[in-house]
Image (tube, helix red, strand yellow):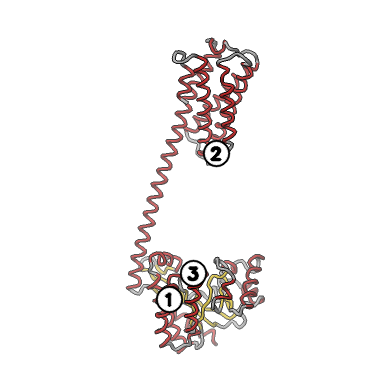
C-alpha cells in the first residue's frame, strides 16, 4: 500500500503511465489482502476469494488505460467501480467488527473517504470530464485525487497496523490470562491430590447410603454406598468434587478398595442387626474394574461375610466394556462365579451396543437420572424410559430408576412396570446411623 502511494505521487523514477499502472495493481492487490485480513478480524472465513482475484485481473487488464488512449473513459469507469466496490466491502467489514476502538473508526473513515474519491473519479469519467490530460494536468480535481489516494493509502496501512497491533496485544493478554488460569487450575489439582492422600491416611473419607425402594411395596430392598469426603476446611464434599481427580491421579484404586471394605462391613452389620437379606450396591470405576486385584480384594471379604454373595452388587458404567469387551466379559464372568451381582449404572448415556445386554452376565440396569428428571411431562424421556424397561424385562434384568424426586415420577414408573427407584422423594444419601433409623421405621 505504501509502495502504491509512493508511485502515485512520483513522476521521476518511472514513466508516468508505467508508474500509474504499477501503482493501480499494487493498490488493488493490497486492498484484496486487506479485505481477506479484515474478514478474519471480523471472525468470518475468507470467501469469494476467487471473485476477488478475478477483480484484480480485470483491474490489471484495464489498468493499461494509463498507457493507451483507446476506450479510455470505459476503462476508467470499470477500474473506479472495482476500487469503490472493494473500499465499500472493507468499510462494511470494519463496521461489523465487535470491537470498535480508535483504529477501527479511523480505518472505517479512510475507507469511506476512498469510496467517495473513487465515486467522484468514476463520475468525472462518465461525464466526459475525465480524459488523458487528467493524468498530466495539475487541475484541482487531479491534485485532490492524487493527494487523497496517496495519503489515504498511507493512512490505511497505519490504521491496519494499529488494528493488528491491538489484536496481537489482546491475544497475548488472553494467552497470559489463560496461562495463569491453567497454572491456577494445575496448582489447585496438585493441592487436591495432596489432600486426597492425606484424606485416605487420616480417615477423612466417610460413607453415606441411599436407599433403593421397591416401587410396588415401598419397602427398602437395598442401599447404594456413596463415598463422601469430610474435608477439614471445605466441609463435606460429594464425589463430583473429587472423583475425577482420583481417576486421573490413580488415587481411585486405594479409595475404591477402601469403599469396598466399608460397604461390606456395613452390610455385615445390617445382616446381623437390622435388615437380613438387604442388598448393598457399590460403584466400581473402570480402572478399579480392570485392575487384576479386584477379585482378590473381594475373596477375603466374602469369605468371612455374614451375608450371601448375591447381596453385594457392583455397579459398572457402560464405558467399562467399550475398550475391550472380551476382557470385560471375562472379568464379569469371574465376579459372577463368586456369586456377586452386576448392574450397569447410568444406563442409556453411554456408547455401548445393545448387544452387550445379552452378552454380558449382568443382573440389572439403572436408568440415568437425566431420563427421569422430566417425567412424565417430557414425551421423549417417557418413551425412552418405557423402552429401557421393556427391553430389560425381556432380557430378565431388574430395572432401577435414579433421581426420583416427585410423586408424579414415581406414579409413572409404577404404571410402566419399573422395579425399584431411589432418590430424594424417599431419602437422600444418609450416614450409617440415620440409615439404621430409617430402615427400622420402614420395616415397621
Residue 197 in the image: state x and y as whole percent.
34, 69
**In the foreground, 121 or 216:** 121
How many numbered marks have been drawn onto this rendered protein structure?
A: 3
List the residue tagged with mark 2. 46
**Up/down of 115 relative to 205, above or below:** above
Q: Does label 1 or label 3 sit earlier along the sequence? A: 1
Q: Are marks 1 and 2 in contact (CB under 8 Å)?
A: no
**In the foreground, 394 or 429:** 394
Q: Which mark is residue 16?
A: none
* Image quadrant in which you'd find residue 257: bottom left
> Relative to residue 74, is residue 9 drawn left or right?
left
Q: Nearer the viewer, mark 1 or mark 3?
A: 3
Residue 59 in the image: state x and y as whole percent.
57, 24
Residue at coordinates 53% horizontally, 20% vertically from top-left? 21
Residue 295 in the image: state x and y as whole percent.
42, 79
Q: Does label 2 or label 3 sit earlier along the sequence? A: 2
List the residue tagged with mark 3. 324
Q: Which mark is residue 207?
A: 1
Crowd band around label 3 with a 10 angstrom C-alpha radius: few (<14), some (14–19), many (20+):
few
Q: Are marks 1 and 3 in contact (CB under 8 Å)?
A: no
Amino acid at each position: 500500500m505504501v509502495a502504491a502511494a509512493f508511485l502515485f505521487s512520483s513522476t521521476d523514477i518511472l514513466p508516468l503511465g508505467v508508474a500509474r499502472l504499477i501503482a493501480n495493481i499494487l493498490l488493488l492487490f493490497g486492498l484484496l489482502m486487506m479485505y481477506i485480513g479484515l474478514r478474519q478480524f471480523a471472525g468470518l472465513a475468507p470467501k469469494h476469494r476467487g471473485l476477488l482475484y478475478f477483480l484484480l485481473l480485470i483491474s490489471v487488464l484495464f489498468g493499461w488505460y494509463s498507457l493507451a488512449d483507446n476506450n479510455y473513459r470505459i476503462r476508467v469507469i470499470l477500474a473506479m467501480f472495482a476500487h469503490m466496490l472493494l473500499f465499500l466491502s472493507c468499510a462494511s467489514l470494519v463496521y461489523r467488527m465487535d470491537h470498535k476502538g480508535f483504529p477501527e473508526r479511523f480505518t472505517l473513515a479512510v475507507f469511506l473517504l476512498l469510496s467517495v474519491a473513487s465515486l467522484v473519479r468514476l463520475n468525472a469519467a462518465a461525464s466526459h470530464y475525465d480524459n488523458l490530460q487528467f493524468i498530466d494536468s495539475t487541475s484541482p480535481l487531479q491534485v485532490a485525487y492524487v493527494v487523497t489516494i496517496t495519503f489515504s493509502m498511507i493512512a490505511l496501512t497505519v490504521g491496519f497496523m494499529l488494528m493488528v497491533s491491538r489484536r496481537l496485544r489482546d491475544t497475548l493478554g488472553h494467552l497470559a490470562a489463560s496461562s495463569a488460569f491453567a497454572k491456577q487450575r494445575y496448582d489447585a489439582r496438585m493441592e487436591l491430590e495432596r489432600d486426597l492422600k492425606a484424606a485416605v491416611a487420616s480417615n477423612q473419607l466417610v460413607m453415606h447410603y441411599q436407599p433403593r425402594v421397591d416401587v410396588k411395596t415401598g419397602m427398602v430392598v437395598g442401599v447404594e454406598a456413596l463415598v463422601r469426603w469430610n474435608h477439614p476446611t471445605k466441609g463435606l464434599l460429594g464425589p463430583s468434587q473429587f472423583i475425577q481427580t482420583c481417576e486421573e491421579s490413580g488415587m481411585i484404586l486405594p479409595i475404591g478398595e477402601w469403599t469396598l471394605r466399608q460397604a461390606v462391613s456395613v452390610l455385615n452389620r445390617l445382616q446381623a442387626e437390622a435388615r437380613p437379606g438387604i442388598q448393598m450396591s457399590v460403584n466400581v470405576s473402570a480402572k478399579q474394574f480392570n485392575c487384576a486385584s479386584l477379585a482378590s480384594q473381594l475373596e477375603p471379604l466374602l469369605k468371612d461375610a455374614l451375608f450371601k454373595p448375591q447381596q453385594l452388587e457392583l455397579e459398572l458404567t457402560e464405558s467399562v466394556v467399550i475398550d475391550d469387551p472380551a476382557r470385560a466379559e471375562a472379568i464379569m464372568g469371574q465376579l459372577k462365579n463368586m456369586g456377586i451381582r452386576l448392574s450397569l449404572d447410568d444406563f442409556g448415556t453411554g456408547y455401548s451396543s445393545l448387544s452387550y445386554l445379552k452378552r454380558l452376565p449382568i443382573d440389572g440396569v439403572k436408568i440415568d437420572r437425566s431420563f427421569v428428571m422430566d417425567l412424565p411431562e417430557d414425551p421423549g424421556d417417557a418413551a425412552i424410559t418405557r423402552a429401557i424397561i421393556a427391553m430389560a424385562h425381556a432380557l430378565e434384568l431388574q430395572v432401577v430408576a435414579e433421581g426420583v424426586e416427585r410423586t408424579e415420577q414415581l406414579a409413572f414408573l409404577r404404571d410402566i412396570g419399573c422395579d425399584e427407584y431411589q432418590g430424594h422423594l424417599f431419602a437422600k444419601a444418609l450416614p450409617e446411623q440415620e440409615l439404621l433409623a430409617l430402615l427400622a421405621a420402614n420395616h415397621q
